[in-house]
Amino acid sequence: MTEPDASDVHLAEPRVCEPRVFDEDFATALVLVAHPDDAEYGLAAAVAKWTALGKRVVYGLASAGEAGIAGMTPGTAGPVRVEEQRRGAAVVGVDEVQFWGFADSAISDGPELRARVAAAIEEFRPGVVLTLYGGAEWRPGAPNQRDHIEFAEAVRRACVTAGVPAFETSPDPTLVVDVSGYIERAVESLAEHRRYLSVLKPHTPVIEQARQQVRSATGPAGGFAHAVGLSELTA
């Protein structure tokens, strides 16, 4: 996943109303994303909190992110990114991670992908589904990836059909999760994507990249010092 620069993530126009506190009264959360590291860029702090509270969190990834490391063939990059994702998930208490085998950079909202989302919902029976932001732009002039847009729409449609509430990370959230106390765990989780991040910004230490991105995605909101912002996907 290539995000906008950390300093740009929160440049959406502010909401008139303060976001509400996200309802955390669930036993199982299903986190569905398009690529390895997508969850770490926005949701890992919340996941760390939930697993610390004894909740079950399961990750489902459409692809292995095999097209995501410049200068590395997909056959080499895929296994590297899968292993980095498993390590990153383990840092925040997640040991159930699925890879669905869809082609990186060619993810499309269609019957096959929606069926795979539906199968994961049927298998894990989550109280809530979460995914990465699927809007067209993070901010004016900072477009979202097509894979993210297509994937979020597939998640939305499958969750509507299944009757399961779904939420996406958002630069303009209506809901917030207080993640104060879980920021460094999220940083450590993202930093497990060492090969990916070292190629993405070779002149910036991996831990610094991770810290910048996590802190930009967990700024103050809703009266909390650090919060993950979400919006309803199935409203």
Image: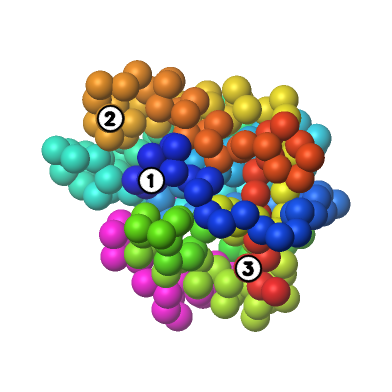
Identify the amino acid type marked 2. Answer: Lys
Give the CA distance from mark 2 to mark 3: 32 Å
Q: Residue at x 75, y 54 (%)?
A: 19
Considering only vertical position in the picture, is 86 above or below 27? above
Secondary-structure class at tag 3: loop
Residue 4: mark in rendering? 1
Q: Which mark is residue 79?
A: none
Magenta highlight on residue 88: no
| Numbered disc in front, either 2 or 1 | 1
Q: Which one is earlier in the sequence, the residue at label 2 or at label 3? A: 2
Q: Which residues are magenta?
A: 99-119
Check disc 3 and give the amino acid type: Leu
Where residue 224 sits, quadrant-wise, is: top right
On whether residue 108 falls in the magenta region, the answer is yes
Judging by the rendered image, the residue that carries numbered circle 3 is 233
SS assignment at label 2: loop
Rendered residue at 39%/45% (across/down): 3
Q: Is residue 63 visible?
A: no
Q: Residues within 10 Å of mark 3 (few under 14, many from 20)?
A: many
Q: In percent of the image, x 35 and y 64: which residue is there?
A: 146
Q: Amino acid at mark 1?
A: Pro
Quarter assignment of residue 53: top right
Q: Determine the image quadrant of residue 159.
A: bottom right
